[in-house]
Image (cartoon, rainbow, N blue to C red):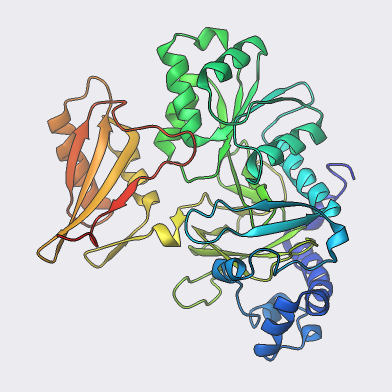
Amino acid sequence: MAVNQSSPELFAGEAVREHQERLLCELVPRLYERSPFYRRKLREAGIDPREIRTLDDLAYVPFTTKDELREGYPLGLMAVPEEEVVRIHSSSGTTGKPVIVPYTARDVEIWSILFARCYAMAGVTAWDRVQITPGYGLWTAGIGFQAGAERLGAMVVPMGPGNTEKQLQMMVDMRSTVLTATSSYALLLAEEITRRGLREHIHLRCGIFGSERWGSRMRARIEEMLGIESFDIYGLTEVYGPGIAIDCPAHVGLHYWSDHLLFEIIDPATGKRLPPGAEGELVITTLTKEGMPLLRYRTRDITCLIPDPCPCGNPYPLMSRVLGRSDDMIKFKGVNIFPGQIDHVLKKTPGVSSEYRIILTREQGRDSMLIRVEGEPGATPADVAVLFRKNVKVYIGVTVDVEIVPYGSLPRSEKKTKRIIDRRDDLE
Ligand code: ZN
């Protein structure tokens, strides 16, 4: 299958709906027949699989949750005979049991096609050299980035995570043009390159970063230090892995591959489907996956589907950058706060860097929030603190304590950075 085998014109507007509904009519009966998990689930909901024919019908199908996938550990959601499975991946499992995802040969191939489209969207070609720093193994990131780049015909420099010394040496010697990383690690590398004065020895022109939410300020910093254009890539292990959506040169949102995936947005509290443009939780139905297809999987990522066509001219539909996870929502003094809103305040406050920690404490039943933010070199901490505190009040509507710490003093991470520390349930 070639990267552009599907004609993108088919996947815009009304044509998307027809295509998706055609695949849906095939998917639901297939799952009923082959997946004991979904057969039970659909039966319990009183759903005849042949009656799910349209996107409106889909709204009657119950959601699939991460807890259900965990309960199915290890292969309870496998929907093909085992001889068709060629590989498994696993989610990190930092909380509770991991989720094991079986892939057929066709799943692996389609994932690489979708991933190659992501690279093409970012302007990567067969002439590029792609340095891959995310982890390999059970995690989907490293191998996904590699398979997509190889399908496109680029040269892969498969570093895997860590060993910054070696990363920089290969980046210089191999003249890598594309860096793929978590945004945290991209920042760490960018700062190291700046500190060592290596900027004129590197040849990067493009960065593809993902696996965690990252704010505009952090993005601007990485781009400036490395002299690159960066692209936000999205994905999750349960649905192939990274590579199911990416932003384009217009940087107004992320195009997603609507010929293979059906996206809905729901209100995370009520489960009701929300109209395009409304912010809520992303729910994904995999239309062509075989090993472990999912019906209405609740991703817990908060985003919205953008109804307008993209100025870049690509017809695949857009979602906005992920604002946060519904689990990451901080409930503070009756206000729901997403980390994306903190990013917005960072962007609006001159003199702060992209790095922060939120520390929540409770004393005598009273909640307090301390935001520790790195100041830019040369900024006056006291003035910046006053301004930041004021902006939090203006943009989020809560009163917090602010501490400005020296630039570079908050720990950097090679994987995902934990920015929220909630000590409210600790013993006083
Ligand atoms: Zn676009």
Image coordinates of residue 281 in percent, x first then y, are 51, 64
**Residue 292: quadrant of the picture:** bottom right
Instruction: Decide if residue 8 is in sight here.
Output: no
Residue sitting farthest toward the right:
1
Residue sitting farthest toward the left:
364
On screen, residue 264 versus residue 51, left or right, reads left
Judge by depth and name the residue closer to the eye, 308 or 97: 97
Instruction: Decide if residue 421 is in sight here.
Output: yes
Residue at 79 percent of width and 25 percent of height: 126
Image coordinates of residue 399 in percent, x first then y, are 17, 54
Residue at 52 percent of width and 49 percent of height: 321
Q: Is residue 60 above or below residue 72?
A: below
Q: How many marks?
A: 0
Image coordinates of residue 264 in percent, x first then y, are 61, 67
Q: Quadrant of the N terminus?
A: top right
User: Whereabouts is ligand 1, in terms of quadrant?
Assistant: top right
Q: Quadrant of the C terminus?
A: bottom left
Judge by depth and name the residue closer to the eye, 164 or 391: 164
Q: Is residue 69 above or below residue 116?
A: below
On screen, residue 210 versus residue 331, left or right, reads right
On screen, residue 153 versus residue 294, left or right, reads right
On screen, residue 94 versus residue 137, left or right, reads left
**Residue 3: quadrant of the picture:** top right
Q: Is residue 291 above or below residue 86?
A: below
